[in-house]
Image (cartoon, grey):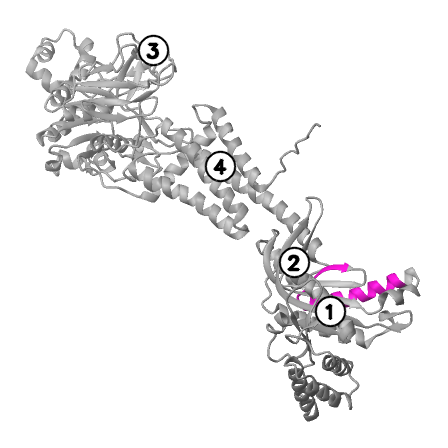
Amino acid sequence: MLSVTKPLRPTPFRAGIGVILLSCLLWYSFGYEKPLLFAAIDEKIVDAMFRLRGQQPTTGQVVIVDIDEQSLKEHGQWPWPRHKVAELTRRIASAAPLVIGFDILFAESDRTSPATLLNAYRPLLDPCPALERLLGDPAARHTLDHDLQLAEALELSPTVLGYMFLFREDNLKVADAVPFPSLDISIVGSDTDFSSLRLIKAYRPLLNIAQLNASSQGFFNVFPDQGGTVRKVPLFLMLDGLPYPSLAFEMYRLGIGEQEARLHPSEVGDQSPRPLLGVSLGRQFIRTDDFAHLAVNFRGPYNTFPYLPAAEVMRGQGVEGLRGKYVLVGSSASGLMDLITTPFSSRLPGVEAQANVIDNLIAGDAMAWENYTEIGLTYALIAGAGLLMVIALVYLGPFAGFSVGLSILGGIVVLVYNLLFLRHQMLGLSYILLSLLAVFMTVTLFNYVFEGRRKSFIRRAFSHYLAPSVVSELLRNPEKLNLTVESREVTVLFCDIRNFTSLSETTSASQLGHFLNSYFSLLTEIIIKHQGMVDKYIGDAIMAVWNTPLDDPRHAANAVAAAMAMVETVGRGGVDLQLAGQAIEIGIGINTGMVSAGNFGSSRRFDHTVLGDNVNLASRIEGLTKYYRRPILLSQSTRLLLPASLPCRFIDRVLVKGRNRAVDLFEPLVEEEPREEDRLTKKAYETAVEDYLQGRFADARQGFARLRQPDENWLYQLYEERCAELLANPPQNWQGVHRHG
């Protein structure tokens, strides 16, 4: 026989797991490079972490000599005559700095130089022997040529001149116009050449004039991202198949006295061009991204590094603070437009960006954005945190699940911030947070749908059988509804109509239906009002249960109170409680004990009910109400749970059919202040019962006879006749037990 497997039904848990798997597949499909949108999200999160961390102290090894607004005011607009720049350089060099770097481009000769002016007027004065002698005199030439003065000043200290690369073709490229090689560059790996590296390629350089021969040169290009923020700075760029170092890198290299830099390409896979892992100088390894860009660990906003105004340096003020330092010469003047945006500031002088890079190289604490680490952690966090979130949202309830879900999202951010970011490791959170957010929303939506279905099920299943307050509690806290089978103490009530069969034989079907509907409606309302659950209707009988599915610490008292109210309601009668034109009578049996409570049935149909011997005993007790002609009988186990304010009287000690243990039966009494004669009757009854139980049948018979004289109570007559029979046929091993059935 062929078997057909039912498809998996969607549940909140399965939906959450599905979102986790789909997220991982989606991110995997994007490949090695993140889409711009997700990369932008990652960058904004990192920016927020920078601002949260706040300003950090620098190494104290980098100082900026600033051509600021005040310096321009004192010495004139930029560009200054080169002899002023030479004087500034000499003042700096006199303090014996470690390295001087110029975040300034000297692309043209100084037009204010006397030699330049005299050469311009030379055709007008020709012939002029005096002019020729002046221009040919080496000593005079030094005075007349400002560029020469600057060149000589650059030789006083290790200096690095900055230049820039252009990346758009403008047909101005000159083949021999390239930066001079200032260091040895090699590649780790003999099968790789420079052209195979993933470096950004420049079109041509914009260089300083050839007359300025410094110790080295380095480009000062920085590249804002799509949002206009500078987060990474290139350490190397490619021109005509050769790599060239940046200004900051060259300053640091000169400062530590290394001559060779080695580029480390990735050996994983066969990617072409090869991404870079980093750069090494001597024993120091500098981590970079694939393009040899340094992820800058920005120290803070503008003025994080010490600024020394150029005007003060020209006056010889503060130069002692430059000794043994990396000195950057640049400008913070807004008019020179050398301003960039960083995670800390929207207007940071470009020279301070170079200062941050140098400081990172000195401290060895640049940020790292390692792709393989990010990939591993991304999928691990999506799977692990996603599973925890699913479990929390599915099994902890809406509020707790929501709280745990938010805690997981916040915990990941806190974890990444403390364990990674503060240790200079960056991790893109966009994939993780978006995945977990998708899990959160999906499971929450499914929970909402399933919660609605669950509430609908609870309302349908119990609204006709339970008190509204109980149903509302189940709807507020569905976890309290244990739909499994469990062992539980309950109080069971059976109610039956006396002589129902004979009465119904003389009643039409429509009249009988009308009567039963009215009868069940009235008694059900009473049961529900007293926190009970109508378990089932069996013909004319009602079975009700207390203390399931919710806990009811007063289940026995509530059941007895309901029984007394039911008897009172039926006793009042009325047209709706008449059958065949006659008032009806009911009998109620109540028992308390352990049962199996829960759902019984099949996957398609089940009932929430109780099963067990104590259920059967309640039914047997109800059957004995006819024999004792009492409306309500309850067992000893129920009586023991009743408050002292609810009096009961002993009826009999019986052995019912199907049980081997005797049961004491009691009848609940109306809570009223007893009259004196009632107290005397109660005492006489208790004495007669005690005589009966102890086997003193003659005394018991006389006691019940005296009770029956003023009150023709069937119970008194029953005991009187039973004692007479026991006197005629004395029992062996008397235990006070009367056997039924």
Find disc 1 in the rendering and name its residue: 740
Label 4, residues with CA under 10 Å away: few <14, some 14-19, many ≥20? some
Determine the secondary structure under disc 1. loop
Q: Residues within 10 Å of mark 1 (few under 14, many from 20)?
A: few
Relative to 677, residue 550 above or below: above
Give the labeled residue for mark 2.
612
Specify the amino acid type for callout 1.
His
- Secondary structure of the residue carrying tag 3 is loop
Earlier in the chain: of badge 2 and badge 3, it is 3
Kindly report which numbered mark, 4 or 3, lies closer to the viewer in this rendering.
Answer: 4
Dominant SS in magenta: helix
Give the image location of residue 306, x and y in percent: 20, 39
Going by the numbered disc 4, the residue's amino acid type is Leu
Give the label on residue 600, or none.
none
Q: Can you tell which quarter of the image residue 229 is in?
A: top left
Image quarter of residue 676: bottom right
- Residue at 86% in and 64% down: 501
Does dot 4 land on a helix, a strand or a loop?
Answer: helix
Q: Name which quarter of the figure residue 352 lies in.
A: top left
- As for residue 170 lying within the magenta part, the answer is no
Q: Earlier in the sequence, mark 1 or mark 2?
A: 2
> At which x and y percent is residue 617?
68, 64
Q: Identify residue type, mark 3.
A: Leu
CA separation, marks 4 and 3? 48 Å
Dot 2, how many residues are within 10 Å of its Cα: few (below 14), some (14-19), or many (20+)?
Answer: few
What distance separates the C-alpha of mark 1 from that of mark 2? Answer: 20 Å
- Which span is picked out in magenta? 512-537
Labels 2 and 3 touching (C-beta < 8 A): no
Q: Disc 4 marks which residue?
A: 434
Q: Which residue is mark 3?
A: 172
Q: 487 above or below 559?
A: above
